Image: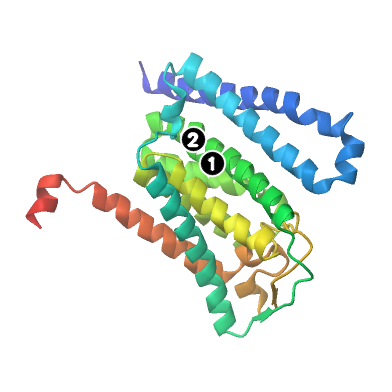
């Protein structure tokens, strides 16, 4: 098989994956825009939950079709192996929380964060939001670190596949950037974090847990802007952030600021070093 033929095969598989995802999405999400539209307007939190669950169903369906009938491999090889699941989920939740905590701590130290008195904390709303965030994160990670990255890897190699997948992750958020240059850089770097987390473990549990912890804490728990939108907020706000837009992110939220640039790059570097360390032959590692 020639190099051109291999690339055409990869691109054809990616095209089929996108088509399968689009078809599945049309089937499960379209009811929100048709006979469920009035219900969605009256129940925005439940409507978001429906949309996020539907999106996860669509991406899982598309991935299963591709792995089962095109790649001829078990679906779980996409990154859902049971080995180390508890460890990776626990570590991921801790890393996601620490990543956000460090970002906010720096802003607090600079005097840019003011503690607010939230109007109320509804446990049921948070629980629903948590489920919604989880399914949304699963959708994004299955798309970026799942089939797309793994298919690109077969031809381009892991480093190039990670870079391209991170670029795609940033492109998916392009509508929220509004011409600013730092938010896409930060979202790209976050994409690197997730892809590196997959590369380090060989499964999706770690990137899913990191992404879930960040989004849940930032949006439903703290009530802050997530990727340029307040849609994940539940009507309360734990902090008021006011400081130089370059550092705090301005309208895009802290994810578009220089503080998060540094913390995200730091986490990506840690994961990269872990990945490089894992490539050291066992004999050399023992010798050290």
Q: Which quadrant of the figure has residue 252? A: bottom right
Q: Point out which mark residue 141 bears.
A: 1
Q: Is residue 159 visible?
A: no
Instruction: Name the foreground residue: 151 vs 181.
Output: 151
Q: Residue furthest right?
A: 38
- Residue at label 2? 146
What residue is shown at x 85% (from left), y 45% (from top)?
Answer: 43
Q: How many marks?
A: 2
Q: Which quadrant of the figure has residue 113? A: bottom right
Instruction: Name the foreground residue: 150 vs 218.
Output: 218
What residue is shown at x 35% (from left), y 15% (from top)?
Answer: 1
Distance Cα–Cα, label 1 vs label 2: 6 Å
What residue is shown at x 55% (from left), y 84% (from top)?
Answer: 109
| Position of 133 relative to 182 (above/below) | above
In the shown orientation, is residue 117 left or right of residue 188?
A: right
Residue 136, horizontal then vertical, whole percent: 63, 43
């Amino acid at each position: 098989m020639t190099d051109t033929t291999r690339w055409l095969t990869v691109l054809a598989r990616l095209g089929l994956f996108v088509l399968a995802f689009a078809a599945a999405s049309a089937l499960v999400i379209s009811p929100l825009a048709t006979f469920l539209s009035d219900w969605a307007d009256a129940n925005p939190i439940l409507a978001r939950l429906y949309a996020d669950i539907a999106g996860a169903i669509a991406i899982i369906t598309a991935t299963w079709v591709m792995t089962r009938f095109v790649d001829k491999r078990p679906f779980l090889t996409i990154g859902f192996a049971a080995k180390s699941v508890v460890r990776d989920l626990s570590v991921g939740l801790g890393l996601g929380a620490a990543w956000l905590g460090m970002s906010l701590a720096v802003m607090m130290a600079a005097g840019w964060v003011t503690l607010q008195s939230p109007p109320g904390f509804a446990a049921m709303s948070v629980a629903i939001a948590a489920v919604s965030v989880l399914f949304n994160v699963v959708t994004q990670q299955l798309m970026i670190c799942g089939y797309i990255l793994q298919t690109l890897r077969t031809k381009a190699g892991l480093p190039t596949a990670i870079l391209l997948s991170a670029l795609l992750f940033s492109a998916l958020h392009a509508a929220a950037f509004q011409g600013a240059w730092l938010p896409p850089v930060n979202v790209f770097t976050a994409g690197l974090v997730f892809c590196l987390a997959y590369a380090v473990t060989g499964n999706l549990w770690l990137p899913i847990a990191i992404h879930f912890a960040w989004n849940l804490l930032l949006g439903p728990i703290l009530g802050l802007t997530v990727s340029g939108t307040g849609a994940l907020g539940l009507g309360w706000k734990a902090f008021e952030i006011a400081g130089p837009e370059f550092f705090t992110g301005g309208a895009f939220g802290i994810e578009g600021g220089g503080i998060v640039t540094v913390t995200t790059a730091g986490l990506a570097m840690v994961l990269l070093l872990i990945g490089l360390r894992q490539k050291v032959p066992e004999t050399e590692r023992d010798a050290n």
